Image (spheres, grey):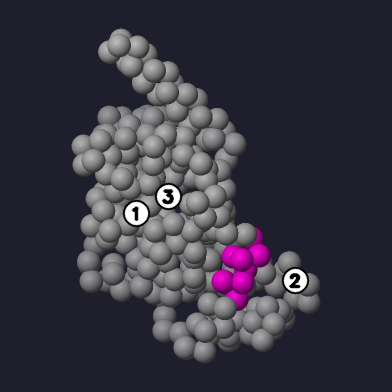
Amino acid sequence: MTQNERRVYLIKELLAENVNYKHMNIPSDVTHQKELLRTLMNERYPAPISKEFLAVQDEYLKNAIDEKGITRLSDLKPIFEDIYLWQGDITTLECDAIVNAANSQMLGCFRALHNCIDNCIHTYSGVQLRNLCFEIMQKQGYEEPSGHAKITPAFNLPCKHIIHTVGPIINTFLREEHRKTLASCYKSCLELADKENCKSIAFCCISTGVFGFPQYEAAKIAIKTVTEYKKKHKSNMKVIFNVFKYEDLMIYEELFEEKKLLLHLTELVEE
């Protein structure tokens, strides 16, 4: 099959299992086909799927990610020892684990074509990720508490694992409770990554965006929690702070410059 043939096959299969869409005509242009396929994947509830579908889907997604371009850890330069700052699409990053800012249902974003990280990760990982998350949550029997973490295979992503964590949601004012919960997200992810012998982990900007956590405060907590964890545990795990927005990049660069200055002043005092 060509990539176009795979896409049409996947659309037909997903349309056939959805009574609301089974009589829909498949658009002829590639852009609208891609949007329709992603919509159908986004809205699909956990359910069994054939091995043939998964084989075609996996080949399609791996080719789609290759087309976007894979970034390897070796392509990045550390900003501190074992700490990196990278602006890019986390679904194209090849490392041991990436962190997903999940919701408490842990099933991914069902909103069609939504550009949140939860949606993007589930889209390019494949429908088996939602099915697996559903199994995990059914066994757990209750929604995932904020500040905790779960790990799954990455399926079709270039990373090995996805670590899912639920960050705090800020509806009104930022409270100390929110700060502690966000710090717990980072700590829980690091602990789980260590437990699974991950040598590298990429963090997204947990709880910012639609979750409402102020970006500057979130970045300060992220850097502080990670650096304290690495120091306490003498960890050599490589940590990538992944940002998507230019504004977040500027915030992290500013905070890292302040950290470099503080370290330099400390060294001068010790001399």
| Residue 244 painted magenta | no
Residue, x 54% and y 35% (percent of image)? 249
Q: Residue under circle 3?
A: 202
Camera-nearest residue between 131 and 268: 268
Of marks 3 and 1, the one in the foreground = 1
Q: Residue under circle 1?
A: 199
Question: Which secondary structure type mostly characterizes the magenta part of the structure?
Answer: helix
Tell me the amino acid under the disc marked 3.
Answer: Ala
Q: CA distance from mark 3 to mark 2?
A: 32 Å
Tell me the amino acid under the disc marked 1.
Answer: Lys
Label 3 SS: strand
Quadrant containing the C terminus is top left
Q: Residue under circle 2?
A: 30
Q: Quadrant of residue 3?
A: bottom right
Residue 75 seen in the figure: yes
Magenta-highlighted residues: 60-68
